[in-house]
Amino acid sequence: MKGRVMADFHRAAVWSRNNLRKIGERALPWLAPVALLVVWQLASSSGRLPSRFLPSPRAIVKSFIELSVSGELWTHVRVSTMRALSGLAVGGGLGLILGLLTGSFRWAEMLLDTTLQMIRNIPALALIPLVILWFGIDESAKVFLVALGVFFPIYINTFHGIQSVDHGLLEMGRTYGLSGWALYREVILPGALPSILVGVRFSLGFMWVMLIVAETISARSGIGYMTMNARDFMQTDVMVVGILLYALLGKAADLLSKGLERHWLRWHWAYQQVR
Amino acid sequence: MSTVLALRETLMRQILADGRQYSRGVAVTIEDVSIAFDGRTVLEHFNVEIAAGEFVAIVGRSGCGKSTLLRSIVGLETPQKGTISLGTSKHVRPDVRIMFQDSRLLPWKRILQNVTLGLGATFVPHAEKVLAQVGLADRAHDWPATLSGGQRQRVALARALVHDPSLLLLDEPLGALDALTRIEMQELIEDLWWNRGFTAFLVTHDVAEAITLADRVILIESGRVVLDEFVDLPRPRARGSVRFAALEDRILQRVLQHRAMAIDARGARASTEENR
Ligand SMILES: Nc1ncnc2c1ncn2[C@@H]1O[C@H](COP(=O)(O)OP(=O)(O)OP(=O)(O)O)[C@@H](O)[C@H]1O
Ligand SMILES: [Mg+2]
């Protein structure tokens, strides 16, 4: 009887020690950021860090709540997201179609690839003066810039994905009676998909960069407008909220693309687990 | 040559007497075929005639051109010289299936979908049956990446067998299997061939396997047929039998004899060089 009580006691001790260690392992990475926040808040409230230079964390949270309650924040977020998505749809769609074309057909590669590779060497941001000249400062200029930014990563990776589909699998598909669209659907597209998704991941990064630049230069709505407008009135807290919003949206896009990869490349994940 | 043909005639008649049907099989005629890669000859003036429904085993050392021969029969390699014709009619392209030496499963399709590749959904029950025959019924919904090498080979075998081809080419289908599974798979292949009557080519490194399954064992060396041996043992063939052992011995002797000749030639060359 006594022995069992001791054993129970021992087990409980081991259990709680293991749990403590687990909690410790979870908490450790958060230690530095939390400490930084505390130091930041202390520096702000003691007046060492002037708020026109950098607002206190508390002020930022307050301003975030105010902006979202008034609904202003969501309007800007919606406008910016729409711009990003339209640019992605136009540029990404075009990149995908042209990549599929040049990857699949020799004549299309001969016709287009060299030209596209030449254009790729021009930094997209260097085109801004021309873009403003062409489109003025309205919506289409921003969508164009985003589309330009996402086009090349998707184009290049789609092209390479199609070109590097396993030759042995293509041979096998053909001898098993697949040809034309069936061969494309069963062998070529799935074989190119990992590479295409890498292109999508890259292009999402470019998408936000191009959008931020475009909105910072000129806009009458959107997160960039909100931020630049706040600068005119020295509202540093609103500026920081805008910057954080861009970061959050970027993270959300990244998570989304990772989720897509996880779903579409399940077979690939299985492969990696075995290795 | 005429004695060979006569022998085959009798053999065919013998098999026909067993009541097998030959509707599916297709004859294969390979005439004076030469294939070279970058100037290195693999097959040279290669001639062989296979009757419809015949089961042919091809043996030979690694790199002698066995896979190249099968690939050229399906049209994946084009001979620089000579012709390969399937069937009697030149217009109708008979359906040919090849099982590659590497299993070549589509990694993004589950096992069952790999087996039904190129076939409609109506073939699913049939595919499941064949998967069960190769002992993988319980893996039907797994990814190929999660299978072992031998299991992948069996899936590839199942994929080749669900089709009802008139010519089936198997490139070392049982190479990575243990002795027991190997015998089971041999029986499966023999059964299917017996019942469906397609023409079969089997590349193997195992002379005993060739004799167990084939009507005819062809040995390739230096790009040519150096041995074309008919196996007139009653099926199913017992490995233990005296005639089986004698035949196996004869074929192995032939392989060794060629090696001995090659060594002799090399030795002779070396000694003449010494004398100089
Ligand atoms: N595409 C190719 N390009 C160049 N050489 C090739 C090619 N395919 C095959 N060969 C050569 O042809 C020869 C015969 O190859 P093959 O694959 O037919 O051999 P094999 O008899 O099947 O050998 P194994 O038993 O090892 O599978 C080899 O020397 C190989 O290097
Ligand atoms: Mg081979």
Image: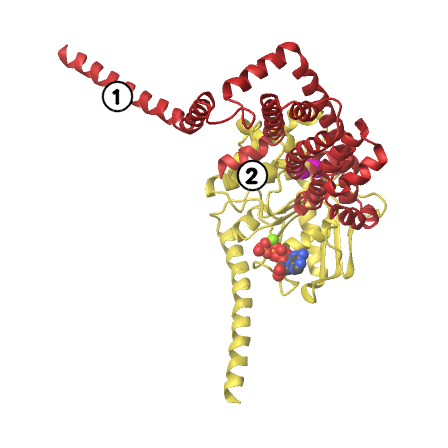
- The kind of secondary structure element at disc 1 is helix
Q: Chain of mark 2?
A: B
As drawn, is A85 to the left or to the right of B137? right
- Circle 1: residue type: Val
* Chain part drawn in magenta: A188-192
The x, y position of residue B41, in whole percent, is 68, 65
Does residue A75 sit above or below B11 in this rendering? above
Outermost bottom residue:
B276
Q: Residues within 10 Å of mark 1 (few under 14, many from 20)?
A: few
Q: Residues within 10 Å of mark 2 (few under 14, many from 20)?
A: many
Our reading of the magenta stretch's main secondary structure is helix
Residue at 63 percent across and 32 percent down: it is: B109
Residue in the foreground of this view, choosing between B242 and A7? A7
Checking the image for residue B152, the label placed there is 2
Quadrant of the rendered image containing residue B234: top right
| Residue B195 falls within the magenta-colored stretch | no
Q: Colour of chain B?
A: yellow
Chain in red on the image: A
* Residue named by callout 1: A14
Residue B71 position within the rendered picture, expressed as x and y whole percent measured from the top left? 69, 51
Q: Chain of mark 1?
A: A
On the question of residue A88 being in view, the answer is yes
The answer to which image quadrant residue A154 occupies is top right
Q: Amino acid at mark 2?
A: Arg
Question: Can you give x and y, in whole percent of width and height, for residue A109 in the image?
Answer: 80, 48
For discs 1 and 2, the disc positioned in front in the rendered view: 1
| Mark 2 secondary-structure assignment | helix
Above or below B74: residue B255:
below
- Color encoding of the figure: by chain
**B185 on left or right of A224:** left
Mark 1 to mark 2 CA distance (whole Å): 45 Å
For residue B25, above or below residue B270: above
